[in-house]
Structures are given as C-alpha cells and as structure tokens.
Image (cartoon, coloured by chain):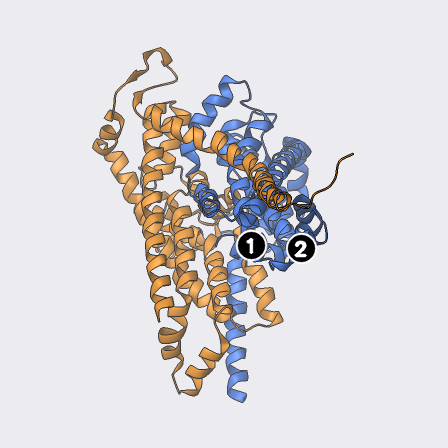
Chain colours: A blue, B orange
Amino acid sequence: MRRLQRQIGLERTALGAIVILVLLPVAWLITTAYKPGTALFTSPPTLFFTPTLDNFRTVFGLFDVVGLLRSSAIISGGSVALSLVLGVPAGWALARAKARAALLVAYFFLAIRMVPAVAALIPFYLVMRDIGLLGTWAAVILINAVLNSAFVTWMMFSYFRALPAELPEAALTDGCTLLGAFWRVELPAVRSGIIASALFCLIFSWNDFIYASFLTRLDTKPISVALLAAYGTYDISWGTLGALAHFSTAPIVLLALLLNRFFVQGLTKGVH
Amino acid sequence: MTVKHPSPEPPLHQGLSFARRRSLVLLAMAAPAVVYVLAVGVAPLLQGAWYSLFDYNLIHPARRHFVGLANYRDLFADPAMRAALGHTLLFTVAAVALEFGGGLGLALLLWRDSRFNRICLALLLVPVTVTPVVVGLIFKALLGPDDGFIGYGLAHAGLSDPRGLLGDPRTALAALILVDAWEWTPLVALILLAGLKTLPGDVLEAARTDGATAFQRFRLVILPLLLPAVFLALILRMMDAFRVFDTIYVTTAGGPAGSTESLMLLAVKQGLQFFNIGAASAIGNLMLACIAVLAGTFALIIRRADVAASGR
C-alpha cells in the first residue's frame, strides 16, 4: 500500500512538472502583453517587471479589434452552422441505412479529412474569383465547411450507430414517423456528440489561417490573419502582438477548457 | 357502396412502399452533405488534377497550353523541390516519432483515473487549441537570440549559432520539429490514453497476479491491445505533419537558405504568390498521392492487425 502511494506521488510530481513546462510558452505570451515597453527589448530578457495595460491601448489604437473578432466569429459561426445542418442529418441517414454502400460513403467523408488544403484551395480560389466571391466571408465559410461537414458527418455517423437499436424502433412502433423518431428521440440522445462536433469545427475554423489569408480582403480578414499581417507590416513589439494574440487565443482555449468533456470526446471519438 | 375485402395484397404493398419511403427519406437526408462535399471539395481537386497538365500562369492566362506531364517532370528535376520533399519527410518522421514517444509516456502517467490527472490532461491540451499562427509567433519570440528567453540562453551558452536556432540553416528544421512536438504531443497522449482506458481490467489483473513485471506487462499485454489506438495516433499525426503550414510560414517562411522549405510552402508560393497554377497544382497532387499512399498502407496494416487480433 505504501509503495503504491509513493508511486502515485512520483507520478504526480512528474506530471505536474511536465504540465508546468508545457504551459510556460503560453504563460510567456500572456505575461508579455502586460510588460511595459522598456522591459521588452532588453537583452538579456528581463524576468521581473511592473505590469501595465499599455500594450492593449496600443492594440486598440492600431487595429479594429472588434471588427477582427467579428470577422472570426462570422466565419467560424457560419461554417459551424452550415456543417451541422449538412452533417448531422447525413450522419444519421448513413447510420440507419442498411445498404453496404452507406459504410463506403461514410469512409468517403473520413477520407476528405486527409486532403491537403492547398490542393483544393487553388482551384477554389479561381472559382471564387470568377463568380465574384473572392474576398468575402462566404468564400471562407464555404471552403471551411467542406472539411467540417465531412467531419461532422463521420462523427455523427459513429454516435448514431452507437445508439441502442431499441431506441428508434420503440419510437417507430409508438407511431412516430422515421423523421419524427430522428427529431424527437434520436437527436436528443446524441446531444453530446453534436456539442463535441460543433466545438471541434469552431476551433478549426477560428484557428484557420491558410484559407482565410488567401480568400479574404483587408476588411473581411479574421484575427488569425491579422496577427501575421501585424507582425509583418507594423513595427510593433512582442508585447503588442501578445496583447492581440489574447483576443485570438483566449476565447478558444477557455471554451475548450470549459467544455473539456466534449472537447476530449471530439478528439478521441471523432477520429475513429 | 364499396365493400372492404380482406386481401393479402395491401399489407405486402404497404410494406414495400414503407421500405421504399424509408430509403427515400434516408437518401434525402444524406444527399445535401454528399452533394456539397463533391461540389465544393472534390470538384476543385479534379480541377487541380486537370490544371497540373497545363502550363498555366495567371499573369499570362492567354499563354495557357497543354503540356502533359511536363510539370511533374520539372518538379522532380528541380533541386529546390527535391530538397522540400526531403524536409517534409524528415519533419514528418521526426515530429511523429517524438510525439509518439512523449505521448505514450504521458498517457501512461495519466492512466490512473483521478481528479488530479483529469485536470492535468485538460491543461496539457491547451497547446492543441492555441491558434497555430500564435504558436509560431510565440516560438519565434522565445527563440530570438537577443531578447528571447530560450534563444538568449542558448546563444550565450554557445549552444546555438549567434543567429539563433531558427536563423541557422543547420538547426532551423530541428527547432520547428520541436515546436510541432510541443503543439501535438498532448493530442497523441490523449488518443493513446483513450485506448488505454478501453483495455480489459481482468486481463491486466491476470498478468499482474501471474507475476509479470511492469515492463513485461507493458510489452506483452498492454502494447498489443493498444495497437489500434497507436495506429490511429500515428496516421492522424503523419497526415497532419506532412501538410504542416501555419507554424513554418510564420516562423521561417522556408528560410534560412531554404532549409525549412516544405512541399506545402512551395505549393502555396507557386500558386498564390507567383500564380503559377500548373506547377502548384502538380505539387498539390503529389502531396495528395503521398498522403493517400500513407493512409492506404496504414489501413492495410490496421486491417491485418485486426484480423490477427480477432483470430487469436
């Protein structure tokens, strides 16, 4: 018993140390944003400083932070909504279909995940240019929703398939139509799957850089793109960049920590 | 006035129409997603395959003409391209190996179910959610040789070039591999942990009472049962590492001296900066082919392992 306790103690010490080590770069990012300008460019770098909000003032002076956040929210919100509307019914239909082909179609959705972004992006870019959607939020939402709806379909396929078969059958014998059983009985039963896939799509689209950087304009770009543009064009300090990064990173990290259970489900179950 | 005759026809007829109605409903529910992915996802891929057979530059669109496989021939003749392929493969293999080793260790540490371990897992997953562009910026700053915490220390201890790890062609790729490992090792740990949690407790208990040492239990009992999760983690990470873009683009953009140029970067530069659509499409297709071969190989291995496991 004592040996077990000692082993648990050792394991926890090791884990705790690793967690701290892993979080250090993130902690650096956070603290940098509160460093005064004088402490930023010193060589060697300084460890102690009096915190200030100067960097946040600079950020709000240089960037339309609210506008950038709105772009990010519209792009990720739009693509999450589109992906759920397309993917949830499709996942259900594939799970309920008895034909062998249904499984093949489900694997097709899984395979879409592997496509390197650039292979589809260039032709997609040209099509958007030809139909006048280049630079709009719609273009980014549309291409983000390809990977996302494929992911939702696969994920919901595995959730619906895992439901006990008696659940829809009981609803059907009670006089429900097929769609009624889907809407009133099965959909509520897979609620956690829907939250998990929505969260996963949200993170993916919010963090997306490559699609948005080539498909948006100055006034439609999301915060992920603005971050790099800020680094490249303005002569700004790491402090200002750290402050701007707060707005890009904090919403997603906090959401993932808050909905940790669903986040973990999305990462483990959805990829099977 | 009509008389109702009980006949064997109606139920059978009704049954058939029910089955047909059922498949129509299912088809209607699945069709929008299938059509969407085909139209917005697969059609551009096919278009890209077609473009790769042309000499097609957006700056001179009128000069577009069919060249067959010349774009692919040029790719393999180009030393920059061969170097990029090498960097991409090295990056993929080294990053995934590191992430697997670290992830397995972490998963074993996290295995015991306790509140402490669950909190640790949640915190460990933070790097997975941080915007990749921000990950790149964080490490670009930390590795800076003058004012970065890591970079300053290394440069002054004489452990790195005065230009810093990212400024030295000999170490830049290695530094990026470590950044990738920081970002994704927790994900591998999570997938392996999910696999560990499905292991049957009685088998592990039996191995313990039979007097197997911890190492024997791991090698002979845990590892074979963990194989599906291992393959899953490996293939997922390999596919993603193979097409990594954001962090490299932000930190080195392929430099210094082309030492971190990857296939993905090359394709993006060709296509969206030089507007050389033919060549860029050829690189995109080459990447697609590599990933398909990778995925196919893994699918075969998993299937064989599954058959072997169920045959026991």
Image quadrant assignment for residue A78: top right
Q: Quadrant of the C terminus of chain B?
A: bottom left
The residue positioned farthest toward the right in the image shown:
B1
Whole-percent x and y of residue B26? Answer: 58, 41
Query: Can residue B303 be seen by looking at this rendering?
Result: yes
Query: Can residue B256 be seen by looking at this rendering?
Result: no
Element under disc 2? helix
Q: Which residue is mark 2?
A: A189
Q: Earlier in the sequence, mark 1 or mark 2?
A: 1
The residue positioned farthest toward the top in the image shown:
B62
Whole-percent x and y of residue A150? Answer: 51, 42
The front one of B280 and A187 is A187
Count residues near mark 2 (Cα–Cα under 10 Å), then give few for <14, some for 14-19, many for 20+.
Answer: some
Tell me what residue is drawn at x 31 percent, y 51 percent.
Answer: B297
Q: Which residue is mark 1?
A: A161
Whole-percent x and y of residue B66? Answer: 28, 18
Q: Amino acid at mark 1?
A: Arg
